[in-house]
Image (cartoon, helix red, strand yellow):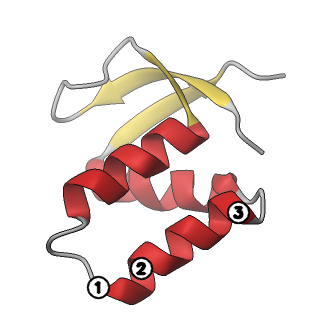
Amino acid sequence: MNRTYKVKYDSGDIYTNKIVTSNQLINDFLEVSNEFEDADLIGWLQTLIKNDRQDEGVDFICNAWDLILENETE
């Protein structure tokens, strides 16, 4: 599900206090990591969007980018 989040913490301070959607966050990650991540990871994240399972990708990206999100979609 394409949820909406408020970013409570971002170690890189790019997203802090901004509103992002699951798809936006995944697509931003794909754009940044396209040159150095392997095809399996990129394919997995793209498949999550296609299969409406973005939550798994958001969890992965939060761990990778040290983000803390607050769910705005309830």
Q: Which quarter of the rendering shows the N terminus?
A: top right
Q: Residue at x 41, y 79 (%)?
A: 41
> Alpha-carbon distance for marks 1 and 2?
6 Å
| Residue 3 lies in quadrant | top right
Pick the residue in front: 43 or 20: 43
Q: Where is residue 4 in the image (x, y as percent from the top left)?
A: 64, 25
Q: In this view, does 26 lie above or below 35?
A: above
- State the image coordinates of residue 20 (x, y, percent, origin top left): 50, 25
**Residue 5: image location, x then y, percent:** 58, 25
Is residue 32 shown left or right of residue 23? Answer: left
Tag 3 secondary structure: helix
- For badge 1, the amino acid type reads Asp
- The type of residue carrying mark 2 is Leu
Kind of element beneath mark 1: loop
Please report the residue visible at 77 percent of the width from the left and 65 percent of the height from the top: 51
**Pointer 3: what residue?**
50
Mark 2 or 3: in front is: 3
Q: In which quarter of the image is residue 56?
A: bottom right
Badge 2 density bin: few <14, some 14–19, many ≥20, Cα 10 Å: some
Q: How crowded is mark 3: few (under 14 residues within 10 Å), some or many (20 or more)?
A: few
Q: Tell me the CA gap for discs 2 and 3.
A: 14 Å
Q: In the rendered structure, which amino acid carries the disc numbered 3?
A: Lys
Tag 1 residue: 38
Location of mark 2 (residue) = 41
Q: Which structural element holds mark 2?
A: helix
- Mark 1 vs 2: CB contact within 8 A: yes
Q: Residue furthest right?
A: 74
Picture coordinates of residue 74, whole percent (x, y): 84, 22
Residue at position x 74%, y 60% in the image: 53
